[in-house]
Amino acid sequence: IVKPNPHINVSPVNAPGCHENGQINIRINVTASDDHYAYSISKADWPAVSQTNLPAGSYTEAGIPTGTYTVTVTDENSACQTTQMAGVSGPDVFEWNHKTI
């Protein structure tokens, strides 16, 4: 029996509130069989975050920097793997020019 790779959907939970903050929360939705999964989130200039032994479902990671990142979900029993690239940008820089009259 060949098991399908886990299906993942990655979406931002909230956009960054301030340009200086530059961080978001993302939700990872894993759907497939009843097996347990591991996921990792990585970005070139940021240390990877990972979780293991999770049932299929929805998981939120907080404080992910804006930019392009890779989310990999692996079925811990069969080693089937799915990878998704995702990118989220922060808000535009707010500029305020004050003139004294």
Image (cartoon, rainbow, N blue to C red):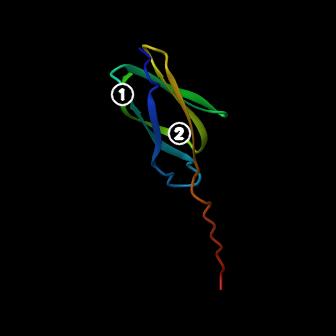
Residue, disc 2: 64
Residue for point 53% across, 39% down: 64
- Dot 1 falls on a residue whose secondary structure is loop
User: At which x and y percent is residue 75?
Assistant: 44, 20
Residue 53: tell me if it is visible.
no
Q: Quarter-wise, where is residue 48 in the image?
A: top right
Estimate the spatial distance between the alpha carbons at disc 1 and disc 2, rounded to whole Å. 21 Å
Query: Which of label 1 and label 2 is nearer to you?
Result: 1
Whether residue 80 is situated above or below residue 21 in the rendered picture? above
Residue for point 42% across, 22% down: 37
User: At which x and y percent is residue 25?
Assistant: 46, 42
Residue for point 50% across, 45% down: 24
Callouts 1 and 2 close, C-beta under 8 Å:
no
User: At which x and y percent is residue 28?
Assistant: 44, 36
The answer to whether 85 appears left or right of 3 in the picture is right
Residue for point 66% across, 34% down: 45
Query: Which numbered disc, 1 or 2, marks the residue that appears first in the sequence?
Result: 1
Tell me, for residue 56, which label it has, or none: 1
Near mark 1 (Cα within 10 A), the count class, few <14, some 14-19 or many ≥20, is many
- Tell me the amino acid under the disc marked 1: Ala
Task: Please state which of residues 86 and 32 is positioned toward the viewer in this rendering.
Answer: 32
- Tell me the amino acid under the disc marked 2: Ile
The answer to whether 23 appears left or right of 56 in the picture is right
Residue 35: tell me if it is visible.
yes
Tell me, for residue 84, which label it has, or none: none
